[in-house]
Image: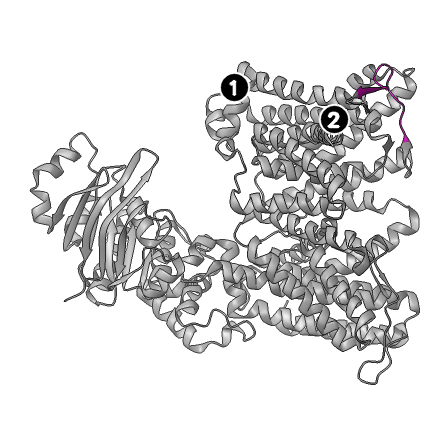
Amino acid sequence: MSEPLLRVENLSKAFGKVVTANGLNFELKAGELTSIIGPNGAGKSTLINVLSGSLSADGGRIFFEGQDITQLPIHRRVQRGLCRSFQVVNVFPHLSVFQNVEIPVLAVARRAHHFFRPVGGEAEVADMVRAVLERVGLAGQAQTPASALSHGDQRLLEVGIALAARPKLLFLDEPTAGMNPVERVDILQNIRRLSASGETTFVIVEHDMDVVFSLSDRVMVLHRGGLICDGPPDHVKGDGQVRECYLGEEVR
Amino acid sequence: MSRAGVYLIYGLAALALVAIGLFAGRFVLYLTMRVMLLAIFALGYNLLLGRTGLLSFGHGALYAAGAYGLGLFNLHVSHDPLLGLLVGVAFAALIALIIGFFCVRQTEIYFAMLTLAFGMMFFSLIWNLREVTGGDDGLIGISRAPLLGLPIGRDYQFYFLVLACFALAVWVIHRIRGSAFGLVLAGIRENHQRTSFAGIPVKNYRLAAFVVSGAFAGLAGSLATLLESNANPFSAHWSHSAEPVLVSLMGGLQTFSGPLVGSVIFVVLREVIERFTENWMLWFGVILLAIIMGLRGGVMGGLEKRLGRARAARPGGAS
Amino acid sequence: MLESFVHVCLAGLSKGMFIWLVASGLTLIFGVLGVLNFAHGSFYMLGAYFCFSLLSHLGHNFWLGLILGPLFVCLVGYVVERYFLRYVYHIDLPYQLLLTFAFVLIFDDLVKVVWGAGSIGSPSVAGLSGSVRILGRLFPSYSLFIILVGPLVALGLWGLLEKTWAGRIIRAASSDREMASALGVRVPALFTAVFVFGTWLGAVGGGLAVPYVGLLTPGMGESIIIDAFVVAVIGGLGSLKGAFLGALIIGLLSSFGTRFLPTFDMFLTFILMAIVLLWRPQGFFGEEAAR
């Protein structure tokens, strides 16, 4: 592989005096399931926000498939294949599950601007939506309003919406937050399976160390806006600095 | 209610409207035209408020853009009503594009205040540029020349032009709501951040909704100018923008038929109240209070609940 | 030239101070309750009409009317908040705005019912009805009085919010409702109190307007509320300091606009509002916007 999927050069971001990204440099390779961990306030959420376009970077550059996307607005990054899910449930509450997934599918299929043709008539779109719902296991609840789903199912829908945008690179922000153990096992299996299918490269931000070490090919540890350790799970587990920065922190 | 039931109701309503045009007296004719004009205004407006979730105080100005667009064209260029309507609608859409370009950068209360500011700028221009707009007198003496050879000078003739425009507006807005674009607008209302992350340029879609609803405001304004044979500067005032909001709210923001039903209630209620008292605004305020405090979702929203139609059970169930 | 400049400035200042009197209550209510209150202009109007009526019944004692009139309006404000507004804090913005708009319709027509639909001429105030000679031209002394009252009200509000126990609670509740509630502040009661106080400010503005505007009309609230909106937006919604300076700017801008660009004076006001909303939606003094 010549060009990495994502390359970050000297990325920095600060809120007043609080530095949340301090000259970060790293690359992400296609197909490599990566986890980003770190104690609270390490800058994980900020990093995702800057990479996905919710926040603008103070300095540094972001390359996606070799092209500079540092200044691109959110929707253009998504169109190029860089998407994210959210830590808190972030769906379209009053729309049906089907419609929740339909919106990103319409965008991908470049049909979203069709303003006169009934949306029900877009047969290809409907097929793509059903395929996504199958993948995340919500096909049976297609007509349920999203707000009526259980919390775990809403998280699945969250991932479904993100996947529907056909991302090449998908950031999952604490995908198991607030889930019960059964749901947790389900979604982790899902992620592993989806990752193995090779269409999408996943990057997961997690608190749960079991999740991180069982799932990941690679673990990146953030601390105070800097990257203090980066490598395969076993390497990170044994790293002294990582232990040190987690010492006294609650390792959940 | 079944789908066939809905079609039946719309069919009966259409028949009734044609019958009114053929047999009703001048007063009912005039009132029905006012209902239809208000309904066009409100249906378009609700595409923005009920669908996209944006509250605009600038639609009075867009209505006036249609009115003055047609009025000035009629007075200075040509009496052709069809061309006049096209000019009115196009001018309203253009103004909506300009105003909207700036306004969609903000949301919520800031959007509302921006539309208020731009709308009032437009109002102040109409008010102060007397040589062009007639200032507080407005434009007077607008004539109704035959449309494609058909006379529309009399109210019972003009009625059918209004009815045709109304039917067209209902059909087009219904199609828009049911389209992919309509669904995306609902997505923006529900969660604009998530819509961005679905790969949708949210601002452009908001702008498109603003322009479409502005064009319908312009259509209503142009037709009203033909009906009254004058254009009134106060139609550009921000408080006129509250009218479609009231109408949509009375009928139900989240339903397609809400603005239609609301328009009927609004115009009829106003007539009835004005029979008994000069202070119809007072009673109107009381009714509005009652709706907001008690009957949120409007008349049609309430009816739908009564009829037990859960939203999601509907085909393409978005509201 | 200089005389004319000074007089246009003074006229602008007095106009600005009136807008400030109305905008201060509006801003306080927005800052704490988060509701943009269209009916605030109605409170201004009611204040004016109540003062006027008391004036006729109390043997032309303006000051007594100015104290008693706004108290009646406070009662109205209490009813509006306690029995209506309180139930819509949690619902969508359009509904909140429309609820307050419904009160505008109601109060406008009620005033017509009680006081008649036409304009009423208002009396002058003993002691302040004359004029003062400034740089060779006459300037109404009542306008000078208003120019003094404005900053006094601002000072009073600042003292209340910064220096008193009540002010600390108000500031706490406006920056974090849940936290204040958790600390034992009875938030609903506080909201009512702030709303009534804001109402009082608006009504006092109306009362003070009685000798100033000359004519009382049922629509007088609607024109000032838009000015107050503009001012509140320019200063940064919720910021009192911003509203004060915004009122000065708008007062002067409109005064100079009327004098030198009469065709565009209204246009100037709204274009300034639009520019601020686009360029700095948090207003000129946005860092205080949380307040």
**Where does label 2 land, which residue?**
C205
Q: Which picture quadrant has residue C270?
A: top right
Q: Main secondary structure of the magenta part?
A: loop
| Chain letter of the residue beneath label 1 in the structure image | C
Could you tell whether A93 is left or right of B101 in the image?
left
Mark 1 vs mark 2, foreground winner is 2
Disc 1 and disc 2 in contact, CB within 8 angstroms = no
Q: Residue at x 61, y 30 (%)?
A: C245
Above-or-below relation of B178 to A220: below
At label 2, the amino acid type is Gly
| Chain letter of the residue beneath label 2 in the structure image | C
Above-or-below relation of A239 to C32: below
Is residue B2 something that shows in the picture?
A: no
Secondary structure type for disc 2:
helix
Query: Dot 1: within a 10 Å radius of its alpha carbon, few (fewer than 14), some, or many (20 or more) residues?
Result: some
Return the residue nearer the eye: C269 or C171: C269
Q: Position of residue B184 (x, y in %)?
A: 50, 63
Secondary structure type for disc 1:
helix
**Where does label 1 land, which residue?**
C168
Q: Position of residue B97 (x, y in %)?
A: 60, 62
At label 1, the amino acid type is Arg
Q: Which residues are magenta?
A: C121-133
Could you tell whether B81 is left or right of A17 in the image?
right
* Same chain? Circles 1 and 2: yes
Q: Residue at x 67, y 51 (%)?
A: B57
